[in-house]
Image: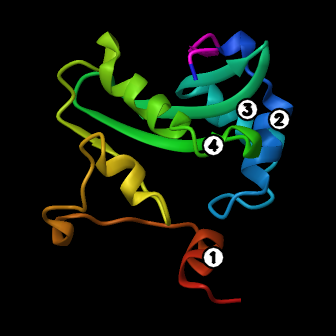
Amino acid sequence: MTDIILSDDKTRLDVARITGWLASSYWSPGIERALVERAIAGSHCLGAYRDGEQIGFARAITDHATFAWIADVWVDDAARGQGLGRRMVAWFLDHPDFAGIRRVGLVTRDAHGVYEKIGFHALIRPERFMERLSPEAEKRTRGTP
């Protein structure tokens, strides 16, 4: 994995590839490129590269002071199982721009063990958290047609 370079240079991002990955995900099926571009523009993004080809992506939505939300962590199929997803999230946690942030959140359906290894855990007080979903996201989340 030492041959993989992590970079937060947005000019290196392969937006077409990222859009394809996210459009095939369970959390943003069919997402359009224009929405991915908006998300990238408003986030601190990270790409993972091997031999100049992008093989991973993650982004943080943050004020760089008190709160950060890690989103859209994706590792290309050929690079999975090598700890790259965890490495990308840890990159944000270790980055000086994120020093002192009190709460870093993320949501996952199936990678809890991946992120527990770097300090994430279930909400301590879930009753304090609320969310507002778009009608489309609520249908998808509740599994209703």
Q: Which mark is residue 74?
A: 4
What residue lies at 69% left-to-right and 19% top-to-bottom? 49
Mark nearest the camera among 3 and 4 is 4
Which badge, 4 or 1, comes first in the chain's sequence?
A: 4
Secondary structure beneath dot 1 equals helix
Residue tagged 2: 17
What residue would you read off at disc 1?
140
User: Of circles 2 and 1, which is in front?
Assistant: 2
Is there a contact, CB below 8 Å, between mark 3 and mark 4?
no
10 Å crowding of disc 4: few (<14), some (14-19), many (20+)? many
Asked if 143 appears above or below 129 in the picture, the reply is below
Q: CA distance from mark 2 to mark 3?
A: 12 Å
> Marks 2 and 1, Cα distance to the nearest angstrom?
24 Å
Name which residue type carries label 4: Trp
Question: Which numbered disc, 4 or 2, marks the residue that appears first in the sequence?
Answer: 2
- Asked whether, in this view, residue 16 is left or right of residue 12, the answer is right
Tell me which corner region of the image, top left, top right, bottom left or bottom right, holds residue 51.
top right
Of callouts 2 and 3, the N-terminal one: 2
Up the image or down, 25 lies above or below 66; here it is below
Marks 4 and 1 in Cβ contact (< 8 Å)? no
Q: CA distance from mark 4 to mark 2?
A: 11 Å
Name the foreground residue: 130 vs 3. Answer: 3
Image quarter (top left, top right, bottom left or bottom right) of the C terminus: bottom right
Rendering coords of residue 115 (x, y %): 37, 48
